[in-house]
Image (cartoon, grey):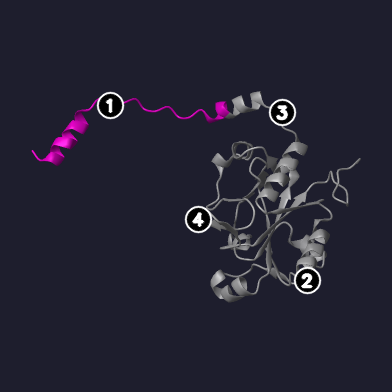
Amino acid sequence: MSARDNILQRLRAAPQGRVPLAPAVPAFYDAIRAATPASTRAARIELFCEKMAFWHGEVVRVTHDNWPQKLREICAAKGVRSLLYGEASAHAEALKAAGIAGLKPYDRPVGEWKKELFDDTDAGLTSTRGGIAETGTLIIWPDANEPRLMSLVPPIHFALLDADQLHDTLFDAMCAQRWSESMPTNALLVSGPSKTADIQVTLAYGAHGPKELVVLLLDNEVNERGTRKGQ
């Protein structure tokens, strides 16, 4: 008997161990909630803004009515000449009505306009499925109307985030949105602009994706100045 056969025989004859138990993830988070103060909407917004700033992302507080005008102002301030958007997206008509200059619909296969997409597009606007307050993270589910390249290629990424869709943790988001029932082919978790680190752990931003991330936080509980109503 060869050494290999001897080893395999001993492995087969070894007593079978117990099947490991699946981790009790819900119980873990239940214990955390029991030991911490109850989460509030305001606290989630504050933490998300704090974490997003840590990752060099920018959060602009807007309302569901004024965000197109705010976006137009930001584009003018940043010198954006072309803004990529999903022509069949839910916010397309609002963009057109706001008179934002340089609107560019994503309406062709990438192979038909690769050079223009990569070299002559200043910014892209996408929707989000929600956000994670704990880490300052956006949840993006690309589809045919808003392909992944919209948030990956342009130097500036604008993202619409509804404050009511902010969750404490990734686990909370997965449960509340019932991810197990339907998942896209490519779900994205985005925290700040593109970044990478070399072997000396020197963090660099904008190395292989957007150099800027601007989150338009949709919150009807803020007024035109971006402060909470009643303050």
Residue that numbered label 3 is attached to: 38
Residue 185 percent coordinates (x, y): 52, 52
Is 4 covered by the magenta stretch? yes
Establish if 166 lies above or below 69: above
Mark 1, residues whose alpha carbon is within 10 Å: few (<14), some, or many (≥20)?
few
In the image, residue 183 lies at what x, y percent? 55, 47
In the image, taking residue 2 as reference, residue 95 lies left or right, namely: right
Q: Hey, what amino acid is under mark 3?
A: Ala
User: Mark 1 sits on what residue?
Assistant: 16
Pick the quarter of the image with the N terminus: top left
Q: Nearer the viewer, mark 2 or mark 3?
A: 3
Q: Amino acid at mark 4?
A: Gln
As measured in the structure, the alpha-carbon distance from the residue carrying label 2 to the one carrying label 3 is 44 Å
**Mark 4 surroundings: few (<14), some (14-19) or many (≥20) residues within 10 A:** few
Residue 101, numbered circle: 2
According to the picture, the residue beneath numbered tag 4 turns out to be 200
- Comes first in the chain, label 2 or label 3: 3
